[in-house]
């Protein structure tokens, strides 16, 4: 598993990533580390991995 903000392995300290993710969409697939295709609108975001498909806010851990 990988951090969905910085793309580094999920082990370790990702405190700043978790803080930033409160206001930002994910940038990396947590399963394969590929960059996501992200679209941000005023009220929501969508993200899609070319290998694993779409991610939604409901898919993300708090």
Image (cartoon, helix red, strand yellow):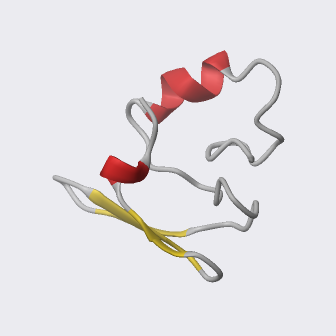
Image quadrant holding the C terminus, namely top left
The residue positioned 55% from the left and 26% from the top of the image is 18
Q: Residue furthest bottom?
A: 50
Residue 51 horizontal/vertical position (percent): 65, 81
Q: Is residue 6 above or below residue 33?
A: above
Q: Is residue 46 left or right of residue 41?
A: right
Q: How many marks?
A: 0
The residue positioned 74% from the left and 47% from the top of the image is 1
Residue 46 horizontal/vertical position (percent): 36, 65
Q: Residue furthest left?
A: 43
Q: Is residue 25 above or below residue 38?
A: above
Along the line of sight, which residue is nearer the eye, 17 or 51? Answer: 51
Q: Is residue 39 left or right of residue 33?
A: left
Residue 6, by quadrant, is top right
Residue 32, by quadrant, is bottom right
The residue positioned 69% from the left and 59% from the top of the image is 31
Residue 34 horizontal/vertical position (percent): 73, 67
Q: Is residue 51 above or below residue 8?
A: below
Q: Is residue 28 left or right of residue 8?
A: left
The residue positioned 63% from the left and 43% from the top of the image is 5
Q: Is residue 28 above or below residue 20?
A: below
Q: Is residue 3 left or right of residue 62?
A: right
């Amino acid at each position: 598993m990988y951090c969905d903000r910085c793309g580094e392995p999920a082990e370790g300290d990702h405190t700043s990533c978790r803080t930033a993710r409160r206001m930002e969409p994910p940038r990396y697939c947590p399963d394969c580390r590929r960059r996501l295709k992200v679209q941000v609108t005023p009220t929501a975001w969508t993200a899609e991995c070319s290998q694993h498909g779409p991610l939604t806010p409901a898919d993300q851990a708090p």
